[in-house]
Amino acid sequence: MFPDKTYHAVGSHVARLLCEERKRQGLSRYAVAKRCGLSEQMIGYVERGMRNPSLETVLRLTAALNVDLGTIVKRAYAAAGVRRQK
């Protein structure tokens, strides 16, 4: 089992990667909010690490950005320097 700080690090990287993808696509928080049915404020909270998003929120964000959640999570684990257990 991973320590809590590992989960926090991976979660932070997921939020960072989603923010980077939004910016790469040239989308505003407002545009993403409209696409996924979340508030612009919530997206900002998630991107800045002020909120720990639910799975539903992350699924909405990945759908709005048209990215694969599995890929984002794998990249977040790698960025956090964590080897996932099988």
Image (cartoon, helix red, strand yellow):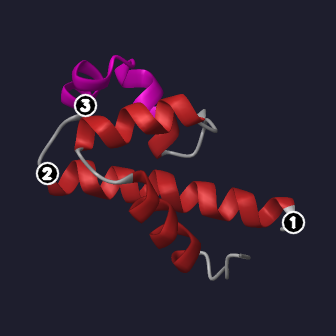
Residue under pointer 1: 3
Position of residue 43 relative to residue 1, above or below, is: above
Residue type, numbered disc 1: Pro
Residue type, numbered disc 3: Val
Position of residue 8 relative to residue 78, above or below, is: above
Q: How many marks?
A: 3
> What distance separates the C-alpha of mark 3 from that of mark 2?
10 Å
Residue lying at 45% horizontally and 59% vertically, measured from the top left = 70
Residue type, numbered disc 2: Gln
38 left or right, relative to 53:
left
Residue lying at 42% horizontally and 23% vertically, measured from the top left = 41
Classify mark 3: residues with Cα within 10 Å, few (<14), some (14-19) or many (20+).
many
Residue under pointer 3: 32
47 left or right, relative to 19:
right
> What distance separates the C-alpha of mark 2 from that of mark 1?
34 Å
Position of residue 24 relative to residue 76, above or below, is: above
